[in-house]
Image (cartoon, helix red, strand yellow):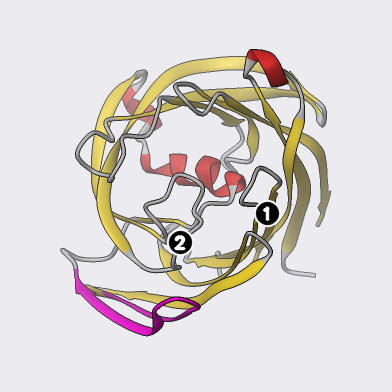
Amino acid sequence: MKHKTTRGAIRYTSNKPERLGQERGREYFSITRQADGARVLHAHCEIDDAPNVIRDVVLALDSAWQPTDCSVRLTVGDRYEGTGLMRFADGHAECETINRRDGRISQRIETPGRVRWLGAHPIIGDALGLVLYPLAEGPGKKFFPNLMLTSPDHRGATGPMLFQLGWGLEFVGRETVTVGAGTFGALHFRYVDTAGQLPEEHPLYDVWCTDDGEYIFLKGAVGGYMQTYYELVELTHNA
């Protein structure tokens, strides 16, 4: 077998004092690294907080970790919201969406080269996208333009459509982290500099991922009004 598949589960909980530790969602994912170096992510995400969100994502990355194509299906408040198919090439990105409210939507967005990352809103993707930061430069902060989201909503509960923006990553350093899935050498990052990039500024978001070149999500915490926490509780590999 020339491919390798990693599977896992992430638990969503609240950090708000009145709901501390209360489960508010979950995510199940698989990442298949194929013989040509491409990676294909499957993620099923459930947010219980009203209006509840169910999201199914299939995101493909080439051997350089650049997005090539993605499909997203959304249910919001127990009603079908939309389905979108995105494709990325040198100089442009395209999307075809059917949305419950707006009908069919077609997008073609010209870009300066290839889009460097697509945030499709699964939590596992928040760790995979950290590959953008050049670790050889050590701890610090860098801003990355020419990125896209499938929704500017903080819960990813609209569209799905392409939304063009950039954001900053702060590399805090290397740590050892223990989560439900075990103890791991970790890279600690922080998402920053979203002011002016989104309709509403995203609170600071700390993310820890594996320090093995695979960038598997370990844990994460969002501050501000969100006060949410995410933790890897299951992880298996088959080679």
Seen in the picture, residue 89 relative to 167 is either above or below; the reply is below
Identity, as a three-letter code, of the amino acid under mark 2: Thr
Provide the residue span drawn in magenta.
93-110
| Residue 14 drawn at (x, y percent) | 67, 26
Label whose residue precedes the other's in the sequence (1 or 2): 1
Closer-to-camera residue (134/150): 150
Indicate the quadrant containing the N terminus: top left, top right, bottom left or bottom right. Answer: bottom right
Classify residue 147 by image quadrant: bottom left
**Residue displayed at 58% across by 51% down:** 122
Indicate the quadrant containing the C terminus: top left, top right, bottom left or bottom right. Answer: bottom right
Q: In this figure, which residue is indicated by the disc labeled 2?
A: 158
Q: In this figure, which residue is indicated by the disc labeled 1?
A: 45
**Residue displayed at 53% across by 68% down:** 60
Nearest to the eye among marks 1 and 2: give it.
Answer: 2
**Residue displayed at 18% across by 67% down:** 111
**Residue displayed at 47% across by 25% down:** 225
| Residue 148 drawn at (x, y percent) | 33, 57
Classify residue 23 by image quadrant: top right
Identity, as a three-letter code, of the amino acid under mark 1: Cys
Closer-to-camera residue (101/218): 101
| Residue 68 drawn at (x, y percent) | 43, 71
Disc 1 to disc 2, C-alpha distance? 14 Å
Left or right: residue 227 compared with residue 116: right
